[in-house]
Amino acid sequence: MTPRIGKFTRAVIGFGVVAGILLALRPMLPKQMRYEIDDFFKRPFIPHFIVPVHVLKPVPQNQIVDELNARGFEVRCYGNLAPSEKITVKDDFHCWTTLNTAFDHIPARDLRLWFQNGSLVHVRFEFPSGELARIHAYLDRVLNPKTAQHTMPGSNLGVDNVGYPIMSWYTPNGSITVNSLDIPNGRNTVLWSSWGANAVALDATDSGTYTVVQRTGGLTDLAFHMALSGKEWAIEERKPDGSWSAMACTKDCALRVSSAEDIARFFPADVLASVAPSCVHNGALAFCNVAARLAPERKVHLLITLQAPVPIPIRVTKVSAERAFPALDADPRPGRRR
């Protein structure tokens, strides 16, 4: 009488046969598929990812990679990113590792990290299809509902790469986005981005003459000139007679590049959820290039007064790349300093 093979034994034999076939074919497979096979066998032995999503913040690249490796994750990294491998244009380094579970022990696939100049700017968690309800429940539990941008009246945060609306919250150090609908046979992603990820540093293209924009959209005759010499910024104001001189200042007058902490002082947290400012400032004012996070090509300039109890932003627009105000200088007088 032939002994009967139990279900468990048959499952083990079947798994062994499949594993043997995959391992035998591995050298002939594309690199990405080889990674998938390796991850399949490693995943059961990978620890749970315990870092809560709302405490993520910019940290040095070496620090986070070393911490993940010390916890038992195998982190792989590379630079020279192609445009399609970036989240934002300034990303210059990418790392990833396989996950087993994350958040509330939700089955997960990958953790991906992006860096700019050695600092963490994006973290993306990838989950298999079918787990979105648990992801939403986790985010609803750990994030402040008042920080949910997608619930704000008139919000339009756009869609993800498959056309589904985006849900987004802001955190103390960035913003979190997730797809609103499950992607059949695909991957659901949770993306954290730092406040500075989309910020474009002020450069020579931001120099020029600016004037204050009225609430009605019209221009005033209040003009100032931003000049960049090497790495130093200077600001001059236009006098009623058409001449230019350094803007009046009594102390702390030198303009300096604003840090993330400075920018958090200039802008409310709910505003930083949707814009990425880059500023220079002194004790009296800040001059900022402000880009939309979801559309970095859309940007405006602001002059922010810092001497009031609460910083006051003033919309300004460039009227000339030179030290000039064409609308008022159409007939310049002899001897006027230009």
Image: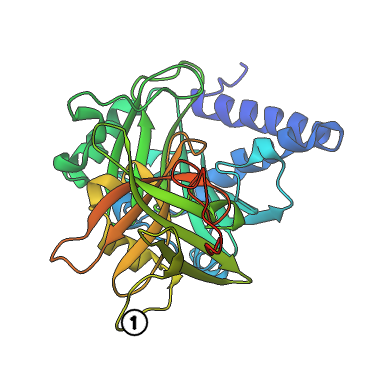
Determine whether, in the image, residue 248 is placed left or right of residue 22. left
Along the line of sight, the residue nearer the viewer: 101 or 326: 326
- Could you tell me how many numbered marks the image carries? 1
The color scheme shown is rainbow
- Which amino acid does the dot numbered 1 rest on? Asp
Residue 239 at what x, y percent from top left? 38, 62
Determine whether, in the image, residue 216 is placed left or right of residue 106. left
How many C-alpha atoms fall within 10 Å of the one at disc 1: few (<14), some, or many (≥20)?
Answer: few
Q: Quadrant of residue 144?
A: top left
Residue 12 at what x, y percent from top left? 58, 32
Asked if 208 appears above or below 234 in the picture, the reply is above
Residue 99 can be seen, yes or no = no
Asked if 174 appears above or below 118 in the picture, the reply is above
Which residue is depicted at the point 72% across and 41% down?
82
Quadrant (top left/top right/bottom left/bottom right) for the N terminus: top right
Q: Which residue is mark 1?
A: 252
Please identify the residue farthest to the right as the structure is shown. 28
Determine whether, in the image, residue 250 is placed left or right of residue 127. left
Along the line of sight, the residue nearer the viewer: 303 or 129: 303
Along the line of sight, the residue nearer the viewer: 229 or 72: 229
Quadrant (top left/top right/bottom left/bottom right) for the C terminus: bottom right
Residue 109 at what x, y percent from top left? 51, 38
Mark 1 secondary-structure assignment: loop
Determine whether, in the image, residue 52 is placed left or right of residue 16. left
Which residue is depicted at the point 30% across and 32% down?
217
Residue 55 at what x, y percent from top left? 31, 58
Residue 303 can be seen, yes or no = yes
Which residue is depicted at the point 67% across and 33% down?
16
Please identify the residue farthest to the bottom as the structure is shown. 251
